[in-house]
Amino acid sequence: MYDHDVLIVGAGLAGMRAALAATDLGVDVAVVSKVHPVRSHSNAAQGGINAALTDRGDDWRDHAYDTIKGSDFLGDQDAIELMCREAGEEVISMEHMGAIFNRDEEGKLGTRSFGGQRQARTFFVA
């Protein structure tokens, strides 16, 4: 029988990010997935990850408003605010960890419009 401190189900970006964070805390982690991590939904998704990066003239407050509006104002606004405030740093962190996002002609992380966002802030893999 296997014995681990933490069991993570799913090897997409969220699962792998959680596994890395738990490992950084010194706990023994097991990740269980139906498919190999490079075949996970994060790589196969048609959408991407929304994040506001200030070097692109975007702001997390605008991202939060678009997300709250997109939820018909039913979303947990405190949770949405936290997510949008941290999203930019998380995208950069995931890229540094090896997530392969599309790039534009200048070599910067590519973005596109998606999901009711007023600004092109969706980072994606195509």
Image: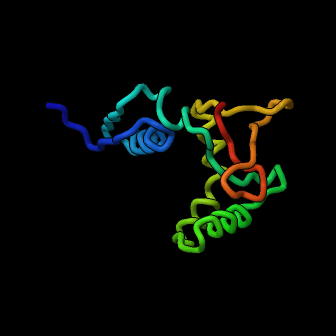
Displayed quadrant of residue 33: top left
Q: Please name the colour scheme applied to the rendered image.
A: rainbow
Please report the residue visible at 69 percent of the width from the left and 58 percent of the height from the top: 116
**Image height check: is 60 above or below 34?**
below
The x and y percentages for residue 124 are 66, 38
| Count of numbered badges drawn on the protein | 0
Is 112 left or right of 77, judged from the image as shown?
right
76 to 32, vertically: above or below: below
Q: Position of residue 65 (x, y in %)?
A: 69, 68
What residue do we see at 56% from left, 38% from top?
45
In the visual, does 63 lie left or right of 24? right
> Relative to residue 101, is residue 8 drawn left or right?
left
Quadrant including the N terminus? top left
**Percent of width and height locating residue 117:** 71, 57
- Corner quadrant of residue 108: top right
**Which residue is at the front of the view, 9 or 66?**
66
**Considering depth in this image, is 42 or 60 the residue closer to the camera?**
42
On screen, residue 78 above or below 6:
below
Q: Work out which quarter of the rendered image holds the C terminus and state it.
A: top right
User: Quadrant of the rendered structure where residue 27 is?
Assistant: top left
